């Protein structure tokens, strides 16, 4: 029986969120209301189109406007339903972009959003997809207040995470597809929040959003340092676990992930750390955490971090 390691493909920018003003929706055609049909945008060089492309492509531009571009009615609907369930009264969707002559997709509340219709050429440009035949909507959505960028001196844990029974810690996950998939799994298996350590990509990167299906908007995300993870652990008496392959020469013992191991932790608050694609777990993580591996049959020696992470998140999820 072999134990899974984690493969680490490379690249993408480091991201940190900083609160800012939300984006101003595009102006309506003179004499129209939000419920009226707005002017059709047909040119990719239109200023509003350029603004949307910057939101899609530029992390610093997203930060400065506290807004992100979400492609597809399904993730838009999931995000809106979740945010509405919080009943915090905040406006979420600034603008809904639709193909010309298309109906507003079912289940989308557009009462607080501007509606902009665009040509197929513009829709393809905005989405970044090869084909837009089945694309029904794009939205400009505010980055929620549950996303924090904090320094190591701040310890407002209760404001970051309403519950701290299960926290996922990502250590330098640079690939947006992997990060997005891990966020989606964290939401699916009811984890309470995510810590992004230095080196992680922007969770509102277009590829991360596509992989997460909007999960970036659905759970608390804190971008901070390892010192704050340690402080969180000490404040709430949490156990620190880290996914790691069982390899020869490793000084620390590695436990196998098993039903009995997970059952023994069902009432224990814990942080699960998953390491970077490029260099694995940091030295701080290796020293501080109990290492856990996934048993594998056959000759396979490794799993992609998002696949391994999904198994960890499922097995270690809260039972009630």
Image (cartoon, rainbow, N blue to C red):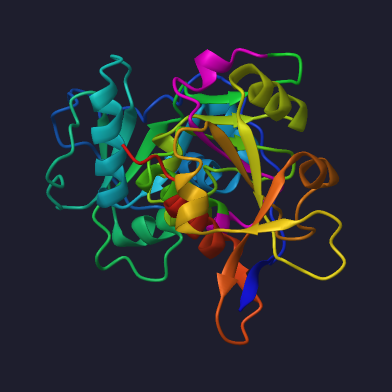
Q: Residue at x 42, y 49 (%)?
A: 184
Q: Viewed as shown, does residue 140 lie left or right of 177? A: left
Indicate the position of residue 11 as horizontal and vertical percent values: 72, 59
Indicate the position of residue 4 as horizontal and vertical percent values: 63, 70
In magenta segment, residue 68: no
Q: Nearer the viewer, residue 187 or 231?
A: 231
Image quarter of the N terminus: bottom right
In magenta segment, residue 162: yes
Kindly tell me whether residue 315 is visible in this rendering.
yes
Q: Viewed as shown, does residue 149 lie left or right of 213? A: right
Indicate the position of residue 138 as horizontal and vertical percent values: 33, 47
Kindly tell me whether residue 174 is visible in this rendering.
no
Q: Viewed as shown, does residue 36 lie left or right of 246? A: left
The part of the image, by quadrant, that contains residue 299 is: bottom right
Q: Residue at x 42, y 65 (%)?
A: 129
Indicate the position of residue 79 as horizontal and vertical percent values: 31, 38
Position above or below: 209 against 164 = below
Q: Viewed as shown, does residue 224 lie left or right of 297? A: right
Position above or below: 105 against 111 = below
The part of the image, by quadrant, that contains residue 76 is: top left
Q: Nearer the viewer, residue 197 or 191?
A: 191
Q: Which residues are magenta?
A: 155-178
Image quarter of the C terminus: top left
Q: Residue at x 30, y 61 (%)?
A: 120
């Amino acid at each position: 029986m072999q134990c899974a390691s984690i493969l680490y493909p490379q690249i993408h920018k480091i991201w940190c969120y900083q609160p800012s003003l939300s984006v101003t929706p595009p102006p309506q055609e003179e004499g129209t209301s939000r419920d009226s049909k707005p002017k059709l945008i047909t040119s990719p060089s239109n200023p509003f189109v350029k603004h949307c492309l910057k939101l899609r492509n530029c992390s610093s531009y997203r930060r400065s406007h506290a807004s992100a571009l979400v492609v597809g009615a399904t993730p838009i609907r999931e995000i809106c339903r979740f945010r509405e369930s919080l009943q915090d009264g905040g406006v979420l969707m600034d603008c809904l972009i639709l193909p010309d002559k298309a109906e507003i997709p079912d289940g989308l509340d557009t009462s607080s959003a501007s509606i902009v219709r665009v040509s197929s050429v513009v829709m393809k440009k905005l989405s970044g997809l090869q084909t837009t035949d089945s694309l029904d909507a794009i939205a400009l959505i505010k980055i929620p207040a549950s996303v924090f960028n904090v320094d190591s001196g701040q310890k407002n844990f209760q404001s970051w995470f309403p519950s701290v029974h299960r926290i996922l810690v990502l250590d330098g996950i640079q690939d947006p597809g992997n990060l997005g998939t891990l966020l989606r799994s964290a939401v699916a298996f009811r984890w309470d929040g995510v810590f992004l350590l230095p080196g992680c990509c922007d969770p509102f990167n277009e590829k991360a959003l596509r992989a997460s299906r909007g999960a970036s908007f659905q759970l608390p995300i804190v971008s901070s340092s390892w010192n704050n993870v340690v402080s969180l652990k000490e404040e709430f008496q949490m156990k620190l676990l880290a996914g790691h392959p069982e390899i020869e020469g490793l000084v620390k013992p590695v436990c196998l992930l098993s039903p009995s191991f997970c059952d023994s932790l069902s009432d224990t608050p814990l942080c699960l750390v998953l390491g970077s694609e490029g260099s694995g777990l940091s030295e701080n993580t290796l020293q501080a955490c109990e290492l856990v591996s996934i048993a594998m049959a056959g000759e396979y020696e490794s799993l992609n971090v998002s696949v391994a992470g999904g198994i960890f998140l499922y097995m270690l999820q809260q039972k009630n």
